[in-house]
Image (spheres, rainbow, N blue to C red):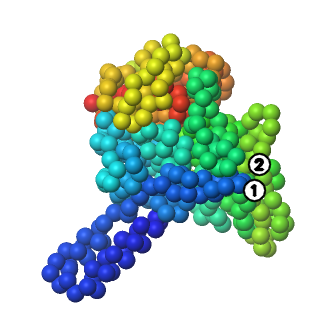
Amino acid sequence: MPVSRRTLLKASAVVAGSGLIGGLAARIGAAATAPDVLEARFADASIAADGVTKKIMTYGHEGMPPVLRAHKGKPFAMRLLNSLDEPTTVHWHGVRVPNAMDGVPELTQPYVYSGDTFDYAFTPPDAGTFWYHPHCNTLTQMGRGMTGLLIVENPADPVFDADIPINLRDWRLGKAGEFIAPFKPRDAARTGTYGTVRTANWQREPRYDAPAGGLVRLRLAVTDVTRIYTLNMEGADSRIVAIDGNPIPAPFAVDHYDFGPGQRLDVIVRMPDGEGATVTLSNARGNNPWVIATLRSVGPSLKRDLRDVKALEPNPVAEADLDNATEIPLELTATAENTASPSICGSIGYTFWAINRIPWPGDTPDPIAPLAEMKLGKSYIFNLSNRTPHTHPIHLHGMSFRVLNSNKRAVLSHMTDTMLLLPDEQVQVALVADNPGDWVMHCHIIEHQKTGMTAYVRVV
Ligand code: C2O
Ligand code: CU
C-alpha cells in the first residue's frame, strides 16, 4: 500500500474527531470509498555505488514505486496525483482494462497535468504478474524510475512459502550518480541505449532470504526501457509457471530464457535444504554474464517438493477461431531517418522505425489512421514480420493474444501481451477482438516506440 493511503486514513480520522457533525456521515462514507492515491513525484535515492541520484521520478513515497496488489474479478481503484512538473498518465501493462482506463494520452484519456488527478478504476479479469508505467514522455519518466509491479491475486492460487516480486531495470547514471543523456541516437537506431547501472528492485545484486527447502514464487518483470535478459538460475530446481501473467500448461526449468522489456515470468524455485545455501539468478546474455540477485536458504528445511505445486488456474481469455480468422499484416521496418516534431508527451527528435511503413511515435495529438479496424467479437491473426536485424518486444494494449508459430523456431503456444520478435523473424499470433476501443501496439524498447515503431488497432 502506498503511504498516501495511510495519510488519507489519518485525514479522515481528523475529520471524524473535529466535531464537524454536519455532513459527517457523508464524509465517512466518502472516506470509505476514497481510492488509494498513487502520487507521481520527484525523489532522491541512492542507486549508483557512490552519490545520490537527484530528481528520480517515481510513484509513492517509498523509493521504488510500490508493488500494487489487486484481486482477480474484484474492482480496483487508484487515483493518480501528478506532483511532477509535466503531464503524465498510468498504463496498466497487460491488464485487460476498459479503453478509457488504458492510460494513452489523446487516444484514450486526457493528459493529467501537473497538480491534477485522474481516477483509474477497473476490474482485472486475469490473475498474474503485471506492471504499470506512464504513457507520456516515457523515455524520461520510465527511464528515471516510473515503473512498478502490479500483482493480481487469485484466491485459488497455490500457497507458497514466499512471494518475491523483482523489478528489473537499469539506470543511465554518471560516476556521481547523476542522470546522463537518456539515449544516443546511434543506439536508438539499433538495439536501444543501455543503462550504466543495473538493478533488481532498485538495488545492485540484492539478496533475499527464503525458507530452506521451501517453495518461492518469484515474479520477475523487465521494466527497463531497453534491455533484453537471458535469465539463468543456478543452485536450485525451478519451474517457469506463467509467462506475461498467463499460466503455461507445461512448466519448464529456468535455463537461458530470453525475455525483454514489458515481459514477466512467474518462477517457482525450490530452495536448497542446507541453511545458508544460495541460489543465483543471473543474466547470461552477451559475453559477460552478471548476477541479478541471490536467494539464501534460512531455517530448517521445509522439505517441499516442486511436484506439490498445483497448476495455476488459466485466465479467461477467449480463444480465436482460426478457421474464420481474418489475417492482418504487420511489418516492422527501419525507415528513412527523419526529425520528429515536438509533442506534449515528449519527442526524442528522430524517426528511425515504422510499422507497415508508417513511422508514428504515439502519445501525440497528431493521429494517424488505425492499422486495422477489427469487428467486436471476431477472430484475427496478426502476421508479424520483423524486417530488421534487431529484436523487438511487441506489445498490444487491451487484449491478450496466442502465439501460433514462427518461421525461425519452435514457439511455446502461450497467451501473452508482449511478444519478443527475433531478427528477421515472422510470427503469427491470434486473438479475439473482444475489447472495444483504440489500442496501441508498439515496440517496448522505448527508443524504438518513440521513434516510429508504434501503431494502433480499432475494435468496433
Ligand atoms: Cu507497457 Cu504501451 O506499454
Ligand atoms: Cu524495437
Q: Quadrant of residue 228?
A: top right
Q: Residue at position x 73%, y 60% from top?
A: 207
Q: Secondary structure at mark 2?
A: strand
Q: Quadrant of residue 189?
A: top right
Q: Secondary structure at mark 1?
A: strand
Q: Residue at position x 32%, y 47% from top?
A: 113
Residue 29 visible in image: yes
- Is 353 displayed left or right of 438 in the figure? right
Residue furthest to the left in view is: 22
**In the foreground, 368 or 326:** 368
From the image, tell me which residue sits under label 1. Answer: 294
From the image, tell me which residue sits under label 2. Answer: 291
Residue 325 visible in image: no
Residue furthest to the top in view is: 336
Q: How far is mark 1 from mark 2, CA to CA?
A: 8 Å
**In the foreground, 126 or 384:** 384
- Is 15 displayed left or right of 214 in the figure? left
Residue 165: % across, % down: 60, 56
Q: Residue at position x 67%, y 50% from top?
A: 176
**In the foreground, 380 or 138:** 138
Tag count:
2
Q: Crowding near pointer 1: few (<14 within 10 Å), some, many (20+)?
A: some
| 1 and 2 marks in contact (CB < 8 Å) | yes
Residue 359: % across, % down: 44, 20
> Which labelled disc corresponds to residue 76?
none
Classify 353 as above or below 256: above
Q: Residue at position x 29%, y 67% from top?
A: 33
Amino acid at pointer 1: Thr
Amino acid at pointer 2: Val
- For the C terminus, the image quarter is top left
